[in-house]
Image: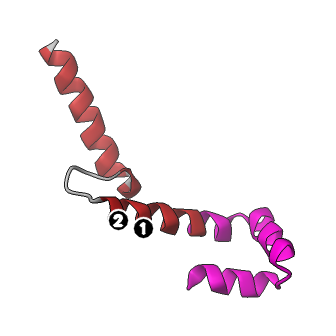
C-alpha cells in the first residue's frame, strides 16, 4: 500500500515537472484556467487546419486570426 502511494506520487511529480500545464499543489483555479487557455491558443496557432477553420468561421484572414490568438 505505502509503496503504491509513493509510486503514484512520484509519477505525478514527474509529470508536473515535465509538463507545466499539469499544475501543482499550489496552483489556484485562475492560474490553471490561464494555462489551459494559453495552451489551447498555442495549439490553434500551431495546427494550420484549426487556424483556417477559425478564420472561415469568423470571416477573417488567417493572419488576423493568428494575430488575435497571439494577443
Q: Would you place residue 60 above or below residue 53 in this image?
A: below
Seen from the viewer's position, the closer of residues 71 and 47 is 71
Asked which quadrant contains residue 48, the reply is bottom right
Q: Which of 29 and 69 is in front in this view?
A: 29
Judging depth in this view, the residue of 37 and 51 nearest the camera is 37
Q: Is residue 47 magenta?
A: yes
Q: Which residue is drawn at 75% across and 70% down?
A: 51
The circle on residue 34 is 1
Badge 2: few (under 14), some or many (20 or more) residues near its Cα, within 10 Å? Answer: few
Q: Could you tell me which secondary element the residue under label 1 belongs to?
A: helix
Q: Does the magenta stretch include residue 67?
A: yes
- State the separation of the CA atoms marked 1 and 2: 6 Å
Residue visible at 71% across and 63% down in the picture:
47
- The residue shown at (58%, 82%) is 70
Q: In the image, residue 8 lies at what x, y percent?
A: 26, 27
**Which colouring convention does the figure follow?**
secondary structure
Element at badge 2? helix
Q: Residue 32, percent across and down?
A: 37, 59
Q: Which residue lies furthest to the left in this view?
A: 2
Residue under pointer 2: 30
Question: What residue span does the magenta drawing correspond to?
Answer: 42-71
Dominant secondary structure, magenta:
helix
* Callout 1–callout 2 Cβ contact below 8 Å: yes
- Residue 39 in the image, given as x and y percentages of width and height: 51, 63
Amino acid at each position: 500500500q505505502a509503496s503504491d502511494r509513493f509510486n503514484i506520487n512520484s509519477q505525478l511529480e514527474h509529470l508536473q515537472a515535465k509538463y507545466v500545464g499539469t499544475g501543482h499543489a499550489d496552483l489556484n483555479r485562475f492560474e490553471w484556467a490561464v494555462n489551459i487557455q494559453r495552451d489551447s491558443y498555442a495549439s490553434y496557432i500551431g495546427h494550420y487546419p484549426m487556424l483556417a477553420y477559425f478564420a472561415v468561421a469568423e470571416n477573417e484572414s488567417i493572419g488576423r486570426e493568428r494575430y488575435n490568438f497571439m494577443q
